[in-house]
Image: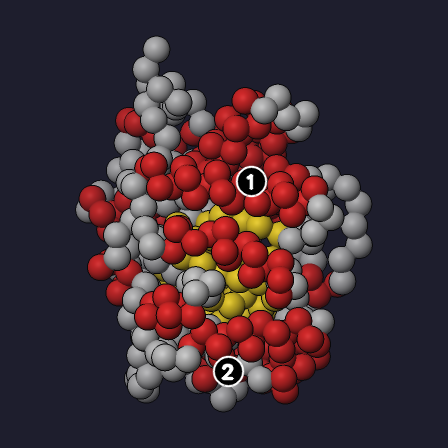
Amino acid sequence: MIDISVLYTGLETPSTPHRYGRAITQIDPPEHQRMRQARSAAERRPIVVWNLTRTCNLKCQHCYTDSANQKYSGELTTEECKTVLDDLAAFKVPAVLFSGGEPLVRKDVFELAAYARSLGLHVVLSTNGTLITPEIAQRLKDLKFAYVGISLDSAFPEVHDRFRGMEGAFAKTMQGFRNCVDVGQKVGLRLTLTRETCENLDHLFDLIEREGIHRACFYHLCPSGRGKDLYRMDPEQSRKAMDTIFARTRDLNERGKNVEILTVDNHCDAAYLYMKMLEEDHPRAQQVKEMAEWNGGARYSSGVGISNIDFNGNVHADQFSMFRTFGNVKDRPFSEIWQDTTDPVMAGLKDRLELLGERCRNCRFLNMCGGGLRARAEVVTGDTWAPDPGCYLTDAEIGLEN
C-alpha cells in the first residue's frame, strides 16, 4: 500500500509507524486500531488476508476468487479457523483481514472475530457491504474491528450494479456505509481501478466526503479470477488517475478533512508521487523519499509483509497468487509454512532484487518500488520475475535514457 495522505499531506494514521517505520506527528489511536511496528520492513510479520469463504451473494466482474452464490466444499471449520488464529497470534502478525467471497455469509464470522480479538489480534473486514444492517454494524463496532473496507465500483448506481452483477447492489452497499458511519465504526471505500472506473474518480471523492467515509483504497487491477477478462489501464490512464487521487487528497487535507487515501498493488505510485513533489518543490519531498525507501515497496510486500490463506486453508504469497500454494494450514501451521524457504519462489520473494528483470534492476527507484506486483507480472507474462506490466513510468523517468 502507498499511503498518499501520509506521504503527500502528512496526515498521521494508526498504521504509519508500521508502514514507514516512523511517526510524522504523535497521535494516540484506540488500542484496537494500532498495528505492531517492526524494527525494519524486512523483519515485518505478514498481514494475513484470509478468504474465510468463497461463497458470495454477488458475482462481481473483477472477483479474483471467481466466487458465486453457492456452497463450496473443503472450507475450514470453526475449530480449524481458531487453531489458525492461535498460530497467527503466537506468530505476532500485525493484522488479520477477513475476506471472501463475502465473509459475512459465514455464520461463525463474529465468533471468529471475537476469538481473534481475545488473542489481541488486529482485525479488519473486507466486504461488499450489502449485508451490513444497523445491527451488524453495531456488532462490528462492539467487537472492535479496526476497520471495515467496503467495495464500491462507481458513484453511479448503474455502473456499480453492472460490475456487481446485481440490480440494487449500489443502494444496499451505500446503506452499509451509512450504518457503519452511524455507529462510529471506522469504514473505508475500496475500488479496483480499471479503464472504466478510473473515469469517475472525482465523483467518488465527492461521495467519500458527502457520506463521511473515513478511508479509501484504490487498487490497481491484477488480472486474476474473473478479473482476467478486464482491461488494465494504459500508462496515460494510470497517470491521469494518480493525478486525480493526488489532487483530491491534497484538497481534502487543506480543507481539514482527515480522510486516509491509499493506493494498492502498484508500488511505482510512490516514485510517481515523489517526482511530483520534487516538481512542486514540496518541503517534505526528501522525507517522503526516505519513508518510501524504508518501506521498500513490493520488496517487502507479497511473500514478506503480505500473505494469503484461502478458503480451503492453502497459503499463498498474496490473494492474487492463488495459482501457487506453499502449503496448507490443515497440515502445517501458517507460521511454519511462511518461514519455509525450500520453495525457490518463496525464497526468491524474500530476497528478490537480483532476480528481477533488467528494467527493474536498473531502475533508479528500485529501492522505493521493489519491482512491482509479482502476481501481475506472472499472470500476464508467465515469468515470476518479469517487469510488472502495470508500471507506467517511462524509461527516461526511471533513468534508462539519458
Callout 1: 10 Å neighbours few (<14), some, many (20+)?
few
* Residue pictured at 53% horizontal, 73% vertical: 174
Question: For mark 1, what is the residue?
Answer: 247
* Residue pictured at 45% horizontal, 73% vertical: 170
Instruction: Judge whether 385 appears above or below 122 on screen.
Output: above
Instruction: Judge whether 252 appears above or below 216 on screen.
Output: above
Q: Is residue 9 found left or right of 244 in the rendered image?
A: right
Callout 2: 10 Å neighbours few (<14), some, many (20+)?
some
Q: Secondary structure at mark 1?
A: helix
Q: Secondary structure at mark 2?
A: loop
* Residue pictured at 40% horizontal, 51% vertical: 198
**Nearest the eye: 346 or 155:** 155
**Nearest the eye: 310 or 346:** 310
Residue furthest out toward the top: 402
What is the x, y in percent for residue 183? 70, 76
* Residue pictured at 48% horizontal, 77% vertical: 171
Mark whose residue sits in front, 1 or 2: 1
Q: Is residue 386 found left or right of 179 in the rendered image?
A: left
**Residue 157 seen in the current view:** yes
Q: Amino acid at mark 1?
A: Ala
What is the x, y in percent for residue 223? 28, 55
Q: Amino acid at mark 2?
A: Leu
**Residue 37 seen in the current view:** no
What is the x, y in percent for residue 117? 65, 73
Question: For mark 2, what is the residue?
Answer: 131
**Nearest the eye: 341 or 232:** 232
What is the x, y in percent for residue 321? 32, 57
First reached walking from the N terminus: tag 1 or tag 2: 2
Q: Split into 4 quadrants, where in the image is the C terminus?
A: top left
